[in-house]
Amino acid sequence: MVVIKMLKKAFKLISLILICICILYILYIIINILMLLTEVGFFKLPFDGENMEKHLNKDYEELMLVVDYLENSGYDNIHIRIKRNEVTINIEIDDEKILETINELKRKSYQYIEKKDGIIYFERWVKFDKGAGAAYSIDGHIPGESSIEFLTKIESLSIDKWYYYEEDYNEWRSGKQKHP
């Protein structure tokens, strides 16, 4: 009788271990499938500089209203996070027109606005560890990693001082590991 109870407990323990191994194996397969899809471009961002150019032209008035306000705000670093139902800003903005414009940009799918190192950038698309949008250079210098974190691509747009940028944490990190 005691032997049978011990065998039942051992069988339950072995069954539990086998279930855990199967779950881990399934997760391993799922991760490999996701990595394969990433390599073939399934998770690529749905835009490019040409697409951003169209949005820049369409949203130019709103973007410039925010640029002018942030440029003359007296603050060097400003972060505006735009989520579905809320906007988080690290400074106080009393100007109702600017707040309405930020909300209008939220409706147009802009997700992040930041002023840093003489650059004001508007992140338009985010997907996993990638993002892209338009950057405005206050003094005309080309934006770099000091102003846009994980920057992997920058190209001039047709309007003076405006640039299309892409940021990709994984690509940036792998590039840093190759060239420390």
Image (cartoon, rainbow, N blue to C red):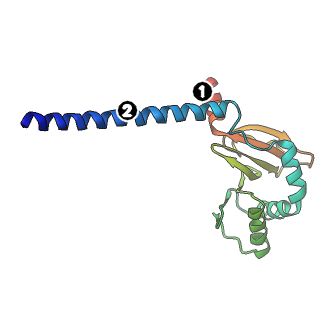
Report how many numbered discs are placed on residues in the image.
2
Where, by quadrant of the figure, is residue 62 drawn?
Answer: bottom right
Q: Nearer the viewer, residue 139 or 19?
A: 19
Position of 13 with respect to 61 (left or right) is: left
Q: Nearer the viewer, residue 38 or 82?
A: 38
Residue at 74% of width from left, 57% of height from top?
110
* Tag of residue 111: none
Labels 2 and 1 touching (C-beta < 8 A): no
Position of 154 with respect to 111 (left or right) is: right
- The secondary structure type at the circle numbered 2 is helix
Whether residue 162 is visible here, answered yes or no, is: no
For marks 2 and 1 on the same chain, the one whose residue lies earlier in the sequence = 2
| Residue 34, percent from left and from top | 59, 35
Amino acid type of the residue tagged 1 in the rendering:
Gln
Residue at 54% of width from left, 34% of height from top?
31
Residue at mark 2:
21
Residue at mark 1:
177
